[in-house]
Amino acid sequence: MSEVERKVEGIARLSYGRLVASLAFRIGSVSGAEDAFSDALIRALEVWPEQGIPRNPEGWLLKAARNKAVDRIRSEQLAIKYRTEIDMLLGDLDAEEEKGSVDPRLRLMFACAHPAIDARLRAPLMLQTVLGVDAQRMASVYLVSPGTLGQRLTRAKAKIEQSGIPMTLPAEKDEYDARLDDILAAIYAAYAVGQNGAGSGDAKATSLAREALWLASIICSALPHAAEAHGLFALILYTESRRPARTHTQSGQLVPLKEQNPKFWLADIVEDADQALCNARQHLTLGRFQIEASIQALHMARRRTGETNWDELQILYRGLVQISPTVGAMTGQAAVEAEVSGPEDGLKLLDSIDHLHRDTYQPWHATRAHLLARAGETERAIGAFEKAIGLSDDPSERAYLVAQKAKVLSGKEL
Amino acid sequence: MQYILMNYTKPAQIATAEGVAAAAEGGLWGAYTKALVDAGVLVGGEALHPPSTATTLRIADGTRDIHDGPYADTREQFGGFYVIDVPDLDTALMWAARNPAAADGAVEVRPVLMRE
């Protein structure tokens, strides 16, 4: 898909999301709202790339949906209700939109992240309802069959409707904060999953990663004072900026961050990330995404200074592990400790992570393999490399680890 | 629940029995098998001699029909399988994604019918 086509699709999906969210809020049904606009979206995706983006994208979609809504809905009463609501939305559009009104997509995202919805479904649910991504596109990236994912999403939407999950922002601060955290975690999960499959140039995974970026930017613009939202946005942007550097052009092998050539990092995306991190730091609440983004920013500084400030990274990781002691954070911390005070210290940290979390966590084994090799424990390093290879689901990463293992076997330095 | 993971690979890479054995022990398959064992999910599995060693038998219209070669003449061929015991299909698919055949061919995942 060309850059222009991607832009058109982005605008279509964002407008679609706003309308679905608005209508869903009014009629109390997410799937009903989707039904009303899905044909209009398909039409837009066909027509807009040729005819150009209409001056009023939402108005266009609303008009296209007005009659279609009636065709799709069997119940006469519902049809009248939907048409009335759509007319009202059209009316709202003509009138000046009041500044400071809640972005309707935000309400929808809060509903999707409700505790009653299975945590694993929140990300695909948001991608589908807010951005119109269909199950077919998401399923393989989530390692589920499209039919299964479609069913689960349908059930989740029915649950929102039937159990009366409100499409509003929680009034109580604690509930609001917790739900926002869950939304951000789901967006990050959506991005991470997309990243995982993108190692070997998986186009579906790459485009899902971009959709997650859209979700992050929606939250940022809807909640400009939410520091962690900006932190998450920065984190995802930094990771995105390194995409071209991630795979070796000839061998197709993964290139880990340490070995990446900064000239392949996308400078304009890094700038956007720096800006987002700056926005985050305007507000005084510190959180895991801001720290993770700051860690990324430190790594990215190598493009200017030619070096990595491991001492600063050590401090940041200690902070991160304190507020978010995940196996991922602790594994990252171990790698940094090794850079500062030697592989043995890193290995000690790795071993302190409990078995339940580390046994099938592939990066733990990969990090351990490298540290063991650097500590001169060749035999155990080989075993760890084999473990990391066996647990990897990314062929480009496997190829890299196989090459590393071969280096260790032949006595070369890693 | 038990699932079978059926490995479909392009036979060109594994043309001889020695090749199959080497691949089974070697870098990718050996590591994968070990990962399944270490995770405590492996119930069983076998690697097979290459498809050229297969013989297929059919009885149709009362006549026996035997031909040299595998059942299906597809680009990817059945080369071996694992049986794993995991809580659900999602977990089985997670292991299937790590299977070397996934990158190179296909992995079919099917629930095993349990005998009471």
Image (cartoon, coloured by chain):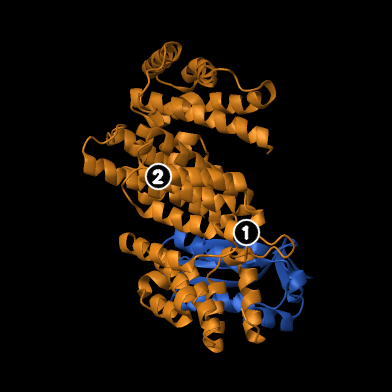
- Label 1 belongs to which residue? A246
Between disc 1 and disc 2, the foreground one is 2
Q: CA distance from mark 1 to mark 2?
A: 27 Å
Check the picture and name the quadrant holding the N terminus of chain A. Answer: top right
Upstream in the sequence, badge 1 or badge 2?
1
Q: Residue at x 35, y 49 (%)?
A: A118
Q: Nearer the viewer, residue A405 or B97?
A: A405
Residue A205, percent across and down? 58, 50
Mark 1 falls on what kind of element?
Answer: loop
Disc sitting over residue A259 in the figure: none
Relative side of A12 to B91, left or right: right
- Quadrant hosting residue A101: top left
Q: Residue at x 73, y 72 (%)?
A: B51
Q: Residues within 10 Å of mark 1 (few under 14, many from 20)?
A: many
Q: Residue furthest front?
A: A305
- Quadrant hosting residue A291: bottom left
* Both marks 1 and 2 on one chain: yes
Q: Is residue A363 above or below residue A184?
A: below
Q: Colour of chain B?
A: blue
Q: Is residue A101 above or below residue A91?
A: below
Residue A137, percent across and down? 56, 44
Can see residue B34?
Answer: no
Q: Residue at x 33, y 36 (%)?
A: A160
Kindly identify which chain the residue marked by label 2 belongs to: A
Kindly identify which chain the residue marked by label 1 belongs to: A
Check the picture and name the quadrant holding the C terminus of chain A. Answer: bottom right
Residue B58, percent across and down? 71, 66
Residue A57, percent across and down? 54, 21
Question: In the figure, the orange chain has which letter?
Answer: A
Disc sitting over residue A280 in the figure: 2
Mark 2 falls on what kind of element?
Answer: helix
